[in-house]
Amino acid sequence: MTAAFEAQRAALADVVAIPVTPFAADGTVDQDTHRTLLRRLLDGGIGILTPNGNTGEFYALTPQERRLVTELTLDEVGARAAVLVGVGHDVPTAIASARHARDHGAQMVMVHQPVHPYVSQGGWVDYHRAIAEAVPDLGVVPYIRNAQLLGARLAELADDCPNVIGVKYAVPDAARFAAFARDAGLERFVWVAGLAEPYAPSYFSAGATGFTSGLVNVAPSVSLNMIEALRSGDYPGAMKVWEQIRRFEELRAANGSANNVTIVKEALASLGLCRRDVRPPSKALPESERAEVAAIAAGWSI
Amino acid sequence: MTAAFEAQRAALADVVAIPVTPFAADGTVDQDTHRTLLRRLLDGGIGILTPNGNTGEFYALTPQERRLVTELTLDEVGARAAVLVGVGHDVPTAIASARHARDHGAQMVMVHQPVHPYVSQGGWVDYHRAIAEAVPDLGVVPYIRNAQLLGARLAELADDCPNVIGVKYAVPDAARFAAFARDAGLERFVWVAGLAEPYAPSYFSAGATGFTSGLVNVAPSVSLNMIEALRSGDYPGAMKVWEQIRRFEELRAANGSANNVTIVKEALASLGLCRRDVRPPSKALPESERAEVAAIAAGWSI
């Protein structure tokens, strides 16, 4: 394994922030606010960020906007943190996005779960192999939401593609995660808990060393408090943070995660950090539900 | 309601064929074979087709290929049948695709289920309204796979957009379909059973008047036999066809529909009609499983 991949593995074992994409009143990406929010994460101690993740409303961005968000993030972050760029869609589009990210200085790409409705086990390997082989110098992190995928398939992929160095696993079942990680190779990959703070303690108990977060946009210190506790094996301490974020994350998860990003942007809006606007098929929170989110965000900011 | 929308409503109450997209040995879209397969459907009596549907591997096509498939289909079909073009992805991309389809002569678009993971009820309306308002002269058919969506939301959408004339509903629960259709307005929309022949009888029993089909690529007469029986209220006759297609559709549905298109293309390959190649994340059928599919297809061709 090259030194570069060692550094990337180390970077993944952390709070992986998924920044929001703030919109201006005219509906376009608000680039100045985007940079301000990114600086706030970096100043808050965040060491790795994923532009074009789901919290960034990846599937509501046009191809041009996806490139803009990649370039803007890499430019703003510079050498201050690692950047793991989300790529997806059809294979040629994903490859072009990965090369674009590399050409602008990214070290790693996260491959979104294929949206294609007909995914076979072997086809899953083929899809990721085609992308990973096209950017052999980049670390590649598959995002797995499919509980049926076998760990052996990930091992098969990494046999062909040594740049597959980590996994964002996002099935709401820590026992399933434990089995998948062992079948694929627990030490071979960095395991990132892909369901954020609510599942981070149970995933860490089974071998994860990093977790993704959307909440981190609102309160970087809260997410960092949790990972510090988990790193030192202090599960009661981690669960104190869990209790602190529970209601917020329950609001995000309600109704099939209908308001997942909506709630994060509402909290940011309540702190005066960006507009609450999200794009369809998400929708801004109704007036009557805003005060509760603001109260939670205010509580974290004290 | 305009006469054009009346004609489109009538066209939807039929076997809605979702053509496969055949690939050449070099992996590109095989245009000559594609035209031959489309002519075979038209010669077989099919009256409405959906290019860029899931059986056409929509999510594995590049933006350029999606436009190619739309243009090729509209050109080949001409006035012989109605064409309902699949559109999706982010809103600006979906609108551009719908306008492109209209400019090449399409009468209707089917809006794929949003792939965005965070869909709110109001955001679902916003997403479809933005697309439908951009092409007021086209009939618009939402493709609904979300069992949680309320029928009242579809009614709300159609209040704003009278061009929303039909629905492809695809939840594997005929009682849920019956409730949704009545909550939205049973007479107000044409109801197309979106889970093909296996669910067509149960959906027709609850008010559907059309069904989509991938199997039709292999054997148009089989699908037409089923709809003729259903139209005449001959449910035992329809269930005879159901028994005839059961094993084929079970192979397509197995393992989370991993081989949904794979099996259709395997059957076409066995008949010498196109290559078996599918794109990742699907994968061609292993050698050992091909004979069974060929035997089924041969049985239908007698």
Image: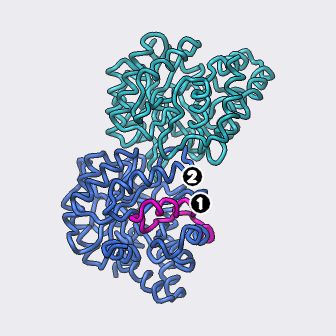
Chain colours: A cyan, B blue
Q: Nearer the viewer, residue B293 or A70?
A: A70
Relative image position of residue B262 (x, y in whole percent) = 40, 58
Q: Amino acid at mark 1?
A: Leu
Name the side, left or right, on which A139 lies relative to B275. Answer: right
Dot 2: element: helix
Name the side, left or right, on which A58 lies relative to B45. Answer: right
Looking at the rendering, in which quadrant would you find the N terminus of chain B? bottom left
Q: CA distance from mark 1 to mark 2?
A: 8 Å
Q: Nearer the viewer, residue A220 or A92?
A: A220
Q: Name the chain under label 2.
A: B
Residue at coordinates 52% horizontally, 64% vertically from top-left? B155
Hey, which quadrant is residue A258 in on the image? top right
Q: Which mark is residue A69?
A: none
Residue topped by disc 2: B121
Q: Earlier in the sequence, mark 1 or mark 2?
A: 2
Is the residue marked by circle 1 packed among few (<14), some (14-19), or many (20+) residues within 10 Å?
some
Q: Amino acid at mark 2?
A: Gln
Relative image position of residue B11 (x, y in whole percent) = 35, 75
Name the side, left or right, on which B20 lies relative to B148. Answer: left
Name the side, left or right, on which A59 lies relative to B77. Answer: right
Residue topped by disc 1: B150
Looking at the rendering, in which quadrant would you find the C terminus of chain B? bottom left
Residue B258, above or below A229: below
